[in-house]
Amino acid sequence: MAKMDLQIKKTAIAYFKASKEAEDSFTKYTRIKYDAEIGYDKRTSSYNSMIDNLTNLSKCETTYKMTVDEANNYIQEFRREMIRGIRSLRDLEEPRCEAIHSVINQFVVFEQSAEMNNKYDLGNFAKLLESFTP
């Protein structure tokens, strides 16, 4: 994931830099294209520079969009894998919780039965003691 973040950051910086260069060359060209004092060669050079920067901007934009799409696809696949893992853990955990619940219920029933048996035995023992004459 860190590699993907670095890739996005790298392409974003290249895209923003190309955008700034294209904007600057476009502004420069629009300022000088009708200036009669500027020579034809300089205007042509400025125009070619603007076209090169716009072409570079288009390439950087395409690269940036592809990188973002790859990152989004990676995140979607990661989320799908996480959901699968969570579901499999839940599928393992539900029977375990049911087993624990069942064991606790059985333990409570056992303890109640043991208590009732002790009360019964104590009652019988008390009757035995009353009827016992030395």
Image (cartoon, rainbow, N blue to C red):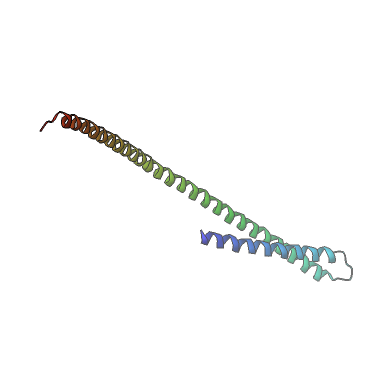
Quadrant for residue 45, please give it: bottom right
Q: Is residue 6 above or below residue 37?
A: above
Percent x, y for residue 118? Answer: 23, 35
Task: Using residue 37 as the reference point, say whether residue 54 is left or right of it.
Answer: left
Counting labels gives 0
- Residue drawn at x 50%, y 48% is 79
Write down the quadrant of residue 95 in the picture.
top left
Residue 122, compared with residue 39, is above or below; it is above
Residue 57 position in % (x across, y down): 68, 60
Residue at 38% from the left image edge and 43% from the top image edge: 93
**At x 52% / y 51%, what residue is drawn?**
75
Nearer the observer, 2 or 21: 2
Depth check: 48 or 90 in front? 90
Closer to us: 100 or 53: 100
Q: Residue furthest front?
A: 134
Q: Residue furthest right?
A: 36
Residues 72 and 63: in front is 72
Q: Looking at this view, name the residue that lies furthest to the left.
A: 134
In percent of width and height, residue 114 lies at: 24, 35
- Percent of width and height locating residue 44: 79, 67
On the rendered image, what quadrant is the C terminus found in?
top left
